[in-house]
Image (cartoon, rainbow, N blue to C red):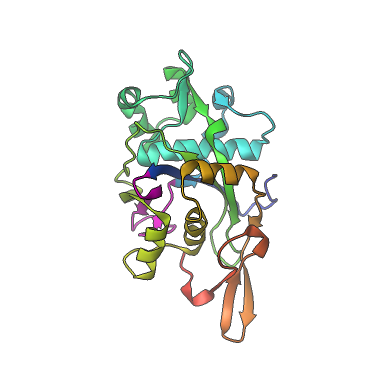
Amino acid sequence: MSNPASDKLIPAATILLVRDGAQGLEVFMVVRHHQIDFASGALVFPGGKVDPRDMDDRVRSRVDGLDGLDDWEFSMRVAAIREAYEECGVLLARSERTNALVNAAQLSSLAVHRDRLNRGEIGIGEMLAEERLRLAADLLTPFAHWITPNMMPKRFDTRFYVTAAPADHLALHDGHESVDSVWIRPSDAVREAEEGKRTIIFPTRVNVQKLGRFSCVSDAIETARRSRIVTVEPKIVQKESGPVLAIPSEADYDVTEEPLSNIRA
């Protein structure tokens, strides 16, 4: 899929880290800091904007699973992995020495790089070269693609990915962009939002609901691999009850519209 042509769109990526819990599939979510300019205070998936350094040549030469990917998809996958590492400490990367995924002990030794990445002192390519790592972009499965409606002052072109969280990686919010975190069943996240216990913005909520259709990690990932990704760019539609934000039915969500009064940035 190519990047929709618009110089107003901010490329971004988000990641649905999933695991099999005692009562079924769980997803890792974080609570955004109240001073963040997008989805402040909301329960969201880890993610963020593509950094220009994500597309550095030092990165491109150290990414597994690039076959057939255009520059847009490449940058999205790199951003998704980097943001997951920065925001919750999960690193989808392999050692060039062993070709095995980074384990918990190696993660501990890499902590200094995570701090420097969060402060913007280095790009992901510098860490990969110094530690002789390769990003495991082949482990990411496209789950959704959303574009912020043109009525919004800040618009994002966002790819959602789903992946199994490495079992020995301790996912934990960074304390900067995110101030809390939780492993949660999708149905519980939706219920708690409906009860007013949590804030979940519309794009996150419908993707959580879709994820809730699956009983286990393998089911979610295999279904996503077989599914066609339909780009969702919500449109305002006037109804008798008032304006709604409408999304295409082909995107296969549980709802196709949301009252505009319910939408928050």
- Residue 240 sits in which quadrant? bottom right
**Residue 118 colored magenta?**
no
Provide residue 229's location: percent of width, then percent of height: 65, 50
Residue at 58% in and 51% down? 144
Residue 234 position (above or below residue 229): below
User: Which residue occupies the extreme bottom position in the image?
Assistant: 240
Residue 219 position (above or below residue 59): below
Provide residue 252's location: percent of width, then percent of height: 62, 59
Foreground: 200 or 17? 17
Residue at 67% in and 28% down? 67
Foreground: 167 or 102? 167
Provide residue 117's location: percent of width, then percent of height: 40, 34
Residue 214 visible in rendering? yes
Residue at 33% in and 27% down? 104
Foreground: 237 or 11? 237
- Residue 137 sits in which quadrant? top right
Residue 28 visible in rendering? no
Total tally of numbered discs in the picture: 0
Left or right of residue 73, residue 97 in this image? left
Q: What stretch is highlighted in magenta?
A: 21-46
Q: In which quarter of the image is the N terminus?
A: top right
Provide residue 167's location: percent of width, then percent of height: 37, 33
Left or right of residue 76, residue 90 in this image? left
Residue at 59% in and 46% down? 223
Residue 111 position (above or below residue 239): above
